[in-house]
Amino acid sequence: MRCESGKHDHHDVYAALCPCRDVLDLLANKWSALAIGALESGPQRFGELQRHLQGVSPKVLTQTLRRLEQAGFLDRTIYPAVPLHVEYALTALGHSVTIPLGLLRDWVEQHLDDIKVPSPD
């Protein structure tokens, strides 16, 4: 696919050095996909997200939210209060990826019984 930004000759996710791979790596991560899904309903505080994403550690959630913010998928807003009030919300770019990620989450839920998930060793 031709690069519309003009920064690259073309985009080819199969090419070893294509920057598309970094984005695919970020979005294909389960915590990224789940965090984006959780934020579809609107801005949330860190604690709300952590409760919604059962099983995620604070460290992993922090890393995930930072990566998504750096990539432009979400905004982090700090409200001056004691204690500080921080909210995370999807950007327009973040909203644009909710549809394909939502389809993937739905597909997994619908086909889980057909998938032979390897057991952890």
Image (tube, helix red, strand yellow):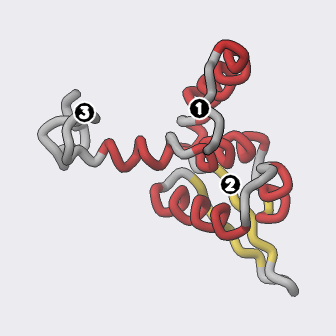
Kind of residue indicated by mark 3 = Tyr
Vertical position of residue 119 compared to residue 61: above or below:
above
User: Which residue is depicted at the point 48% across and 63% down?
Assistant: 70
Kind of residue indicated by mark 1 = Leu
Residue 89: which numbered mark, if any? 2
Closer to the chain start, of discs 3 and 2, is: 3
| Residue at image mark 1 | 101
User: Which residue is depicted at the point 19% across and 37% down?
Assistant: 15
**What quarter of the picture does the N terminus occupy?**
top left
User: Which residue is depicted at the point 28% across and 48% down?
Assistant: 19
Give percent across and percent down for residue 37. 69, 40
Which of the 4 quarters of the picture holds residue 45?
Answer: bottom right
Q: Are dots 3 and 2 in contact, CB under 8 Å?
A: no
Q: Label 1: few (<14), some or many (≥20) within 10 Å?
A: some
Q: CA distance from mark 3 to mark 2?
A: 31 Å
| Residue at image mark 3 | 14
